[in-house]
Image: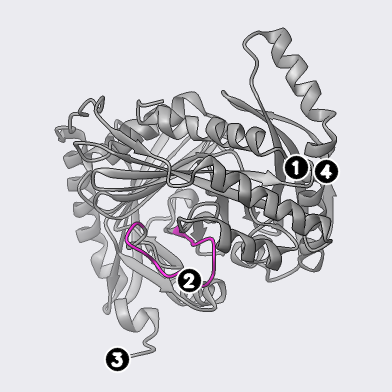
Amino acid sequence: MLNKSIVEQYGRLVSYSLPCEGVSLGNFLRAMRGNPRFYWESSHDDVAFAGTGIAVELVAYSDRFTSIERQVRELFDGAVILNDKEPLAAPRLFGGFSFRDDFIPDETWADFPPAHFVLPHYQLLQFHGQTWLTINAHTDDDPESLRDDLHAALTAKIEQIKNATLPFSKPQHTYEINYPLSFEAWKAGIHAAIQRMAAGELQKVVLARVAEIRFPYHVDVDSALDYLAKVYPQTYRFLFEPRPYHAFYGATPELLAGVYGNQVKTMGLAGSIRRGKTPVEDGALTAELLNSPKDRYEHQLVVDRIRERLTHLTHNLQIAPTGIMTLSNIHHLHTAIEGTLREGVGVLQVAETLHPTPALGGEPRDVAMQIIRESEPVPRGWYAAPVGWIDRNLNGQFSVAIRSAVAQGKRVWAYAGAGIVPASDPQKEWDETALKFQPMLNALRIG
């Protein structure tokens, strides 16, 4: 039957949580390998979530942000939380969107429709040294009648995780790597974009390229995530694996939208330079980036458009001075942006309004999107798109899914992009994308 409500499809949502000391997030994910898995961690908040199994699945192909918001409201309307001693352990959905709203999943992205969110059957929370496990289920009966069964299921799952034999990570020294876009094609695309800038049609466009890697074994996503957490702790790290061994994962420095009650946070992040080999060289490079007319122009385009797009959603908006965000391998120009939302505005409305910012699309948006479609030989899929989580109050966090890769069995595709403005040099932009590939390649132990 078409057009069933979420409750008609699944039944009434009921959740139950228990503390589960002695279970680490990494061991939880490894123990659940071979099942659908989900993960989000932000060192900025000292909070991490992980999930396994699928209690509810939300998908949208058209009017996707509005459709997902409607489905989220339906899901949580009447939901019952039987043990709400820890609010952060409450049920939340993990998922994201494709870069383009007209995206048709190809072979690489077959398991990633234009909008896809999952409420895990089991959901782990870690924060400030505490760990909680939540079970999400459905019923057409009195939710209270499930309390004992849910408690027993959680207790059994906790023991299963503690006693699990964790899979061994195979070394992946043998691999093949291919870059579908040649430097000559890259250079031609940049020159064509700059010509359109000279004609007044375009101010900026972000062009991306892809590295395809083949291994003799399944891609070791778990070890990659461990590496990214260790080497890039300042990032937002994520895993969306709706089908075993079909995973989108990454460690991105860029927050698209964080909504917490009536407060919103986002950032401008554009303009980059490599790290130095010594403190003196590193300081010189940050000064060079801060004083680069090309990079400051590119960055200001992003900040100005974010300010403009958020005006109708906020009562006030505070733009911090532009500074430097430093990661292990790269410096970025960074501007923190915060504000107070108008009543009734949730994280999905903010994400829809902002995506894509000029940091990953371009300016004007419609012209840049057309150029991206014409210039890039491989579809972006979910690369550079909103990925994150949503709770029952329509609070949530969405990162911009850069420094990311999609794995399918024994193959993985990593993505990297560069902002093109009138002063761009094709060789320097090519080198910048090579630098941005490094986190994902190193995480796979092939960098």
Pointers 1 and 3 in contact (C-beta within 8 Å):
no
| Amino acid on which disc 4 is placed | Tyr
- State how far apart marks 4 and 3 are (Cα): 53 Å
Secondary element at tag 1: strand
- When the figure is inspected, residue 180 is found, relative to residue 63, above or below; the finding is above
| Amino acid on which disc 1 is placed | Ala
The label nearer to you, 2 versus 3, is: 3
Q: Is residue 411 magenta?
A: no
Q: Nearer the viewer, residue 149 or 369?
A: 369
N-terminal of the pair, mark 4 or mark 3, is: 3
Scheme of image coloration: one colour
Q: Which mark is residue 297?
A: 4
- Could you tell me which residue is drawn at 70 percent across and 46 percent down? 420
- State how far apart marks 1 and 4 are (Cα): 17 Å
Which class describes the residues within 10 Å of circle 1: few (<14), some (14-19), or many (20+)? some
| Amino acid on which disc 3 is placed | Met
Q: From which residue to which does the magenta span run?
A: 95-108
- Could you tell me which residue is drawn at 79 percent across and 41 percent down? 423
Q: Which mark is residue 1?
A: 3
Q: Position of residue 148 (x, y in %)?
A: 22, 59
Q: Is residue 101 magenta?
A: yes
Q: Which mark is residue 100?
A: none
Indicate the quadrant where residue 357 lies: bottom right
Quadrant where the N terminus is found in the figure: bottom left
N-terminal of the pair, mark 1 or mark 3, is: 3
What residue sits right under mark 2 in the picture? 72
| Amino acid on which disc 2 is placed | Val
What residue sits right under mark 1 in the picture? 336
